[in-house]
Amino acid sequence: MTVPPDNPRTTDVPICEERLTDCLASAWSWSGDLPRFADSCQSKADRWAIAAGILAASTSVSVYPLLTKSDAPWAKFVLSFIAMLSAISALVPRVKNYGEQAGTARVLAAQYGSVYGRLLDIVRDTDLNQRAARLVVDEYQAIKAKKDTLRGITTWTTKHRSATDDKRTRTHRDEEPSGPPPAGDTDSADRTG
């Protein structure tokens, strides 16, 4: 992980505890959500691959008997249509990058987990080391930027997070962090960068 060089315009601005707490909650949330997103993407890729395989197998088994025993144009059309569906089924997961998305999401989940630990150490330290805080927040922002490039993550998150998660996490700033922050509070941390 490379951290951007110090920029006098950004390194002079101190990092407040609320921003650290927001990043902490977001990192915790994404370290749990991204593996589920990865599983969802992988399942889609697997389903499309299985469909393509079944369609290709049924086409290959049917082609010889159909061509040798039938002159009916509808039978040849049906066989051609199934072959086309097979090709489309094989193409969809490649175009949508489901497998690649799954792999990237798994890597990012591990990175979020790692940065969560460092953020927790900084939040719990009695003396806020601004240089260390800046480095970890910059690392968090770099991970977040990669996460934001995942195709479909916003739609998936909207579908899979409940309204109760949002209500429950709004109070985490009022409490002393005694364990992992509640899952689901990514809104405020995502606005920070």
Image (cartoon, rainbow, N blue to C red):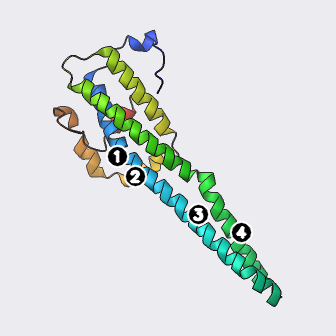
Q: Which residue is mark 2?
A: 36
Give the CA separation, mark 3 to mark 2. Answer: 20 Å
Tell me residue 127's x, y (percent): 21, 16
Q: Which residue is mark 1?
A: 32
Give the CA separation, mark 4 to mark 2. Answer: 32 Å
Give the CA separation, mark 3 to mark 1. Answer: 27 Å
Query: Within 10 angstroms of label 1, few (less than 14), some, or many (20 or more) residues?
Result: some
The tag earlier along the polypeptide, 3 or 4, is 3
**138 or 157, which lies in front?**
138
Give the CA separation, mark 2 to mark 1. Answer: 7 Å
Name the residue located 44 percent from the left edge and 39 percent from the top edge: 108
Q: Is residue 183 positioned above or below 91 on the image?
A: above
Q: Is residue 83 left or right of residue 192?
A: right
Q: Secondary structure at mark 3?
A: helix
Q: Which residue is mark 3?
A: 49
Amino acid type, mark 2: Arg
Quadrant for residue 22, please give it. top left
The C terminus appears in which quarter of the rendering?
A: top left
Contact check, label 2 and label 1, Cβ < 8 Å = yes
Give the CA separation, mark 3 to mark 4. Answer: 14 Å
Q: Is residue 15 left or right of residue 34?
A: left
Name the residue located 21 percent from the left edge and 22 percent from the top edge: 125
**166 or 23, which lies in front?**
23
Whether residue 102 appears in this view of the structure is yes
Amino acid type, mark 3: Ala
Which numbered mark, 3 or 4, is in the foreground of this view? 3
Tell me residue 160's x, y (percent): 37, 54
